[in-house]
Amino acid sequence: MKSRFLGLRPRNDRTARGGSSPVCHPERSEGPAFQPSPNAGLHVALIPDGNGRWAQARGLARSAGHRAGAEVVGRIVEAAARLGLGTLTLYAFAHYNWRRPPEEVARLMQLFLTFLRAHTATLAGHGGRLTVLGRRDRLSPELREAVETAEAATARGPNLHLRLAIDYSSREAIVEAARRLEGGSAADFARLVAGDAPDVDFHIRTGGELRLSDFLLWECAYAELYFTPTLWPDFTAGEFEAALENFHRRERRFGRLPAATLAREGGTDGLHP
């Protein structure tokens, strides 16, 4: 991928080096006033499903589908950064994926290793942050080292937080949090399950399947769900943006009455004066 990966402004500009900020002359400004992104702080979870079916439909090996899918990951991460998302969590490898043929698993692990080695420096230079969820004891020493290197190099990134779930199970994460919790609060438990990431706002799954597949079950308690039949290698930045537009047209009530009902009845939802 090109050096514009993540679509972010590099941190080593003049202000990041401690130089003076550009002088602002409001009377000379041109164009519309700055508007914050409606996606600021948004946490999107993504299940990129359909690589194997995409390859099989073209008479290709499943590994070809995974390679094509890896290219799409880069483009969607770039789009997420450009659109101002706060967090993007991708389900890269579920704990039950170990049941697949060993050759396929090995190729997937090599793709993860290649991705981390190829993009860690660029991600760090553009102020992105990367963390990996899931078990690490079953990963190769090489991959564990690449994960730790990527996390350390990007730990202070203030921009998009990219989270890759590798050998991940939400049920296992919840059980492990319960095992570790000793007299803590609900907030303590949530931190043990989800780390410092906010709850998921929008959950997207490609490939036509209509299930969560043990992915971020705790964090998705109030997430809006979006399912598309598009296979992951065919999923474009344009479709990703359209999905976000669909999200913003929804009314998230969190147990309250719809705004239209409140306006019609002239009352409150019982939660607010």
Image: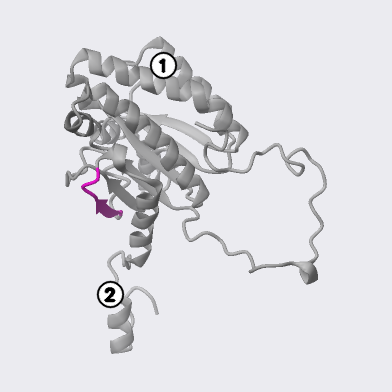
Q: Residue 216 falls in which quadrant of the image?
A: top left
Q: Residue 193 colored magenta?
A: no
- Tag 2: residue type? Leu
* Above/below status of 254 relative to 129: below
The quadrant of the image that shows the C terminus is: bottom left
Q: Compare residues 235 and 47 and report the one nearer the observer.
A: 235
Answer whether residue 171 is visible to the viewer in this image.
yes
Q: Which is nearer the N-term, disc 1 or disc 2?
A: 1
Coordinates of residue 63 in the picture (x, y in percent): 27, 22
Residue at point 30% right, 81% down? 260
- Label ID, residue 125: none
- The residues colored magenta run 223-230
- Tag 1: residue type? Leu
Residue at point 41% right, 49% down? 43
Residue at point 30% right, 37% down? 233
In whole angstroms, how far apart are the C-alphas of marks 1 and 2? 48 Å
* Above/below status of 138 relative to 47: above
Q: Compare residues 161 and 230 and report the one nearer the observer.
A: 230
Query: Circle 1 — which element?
Result: helix
Q: Is residue 119 left or right of residue 137?
A: right
Q: Nearer the viewer, mark 1 or mark 2?
A: 1
| Residue matched to label 1 | 143
Q: Is residue 229 left or right of residue 115?
A: left
The figure's colour scheme reads one colour
Q: Residue 100 falls in which quadrant of the image?
A: top left
Q: Is residue 9 left or right of residue 164?
A: right
Q: Residue 269 falls in which quadrant of the image?
A: bottom left
Q: Is residue 158 left or right of residue 251?
A: right
- Label ID, residue 257: 2
Q: Compare residues 219 and 241 and report the one nearer the observer.
A: 241
Coordinates of residue 2 in the picture (x, y in percent): 54, 33
Q: Residues within 10 Å of mark 2 (few under 14, many from 20)?
A: few
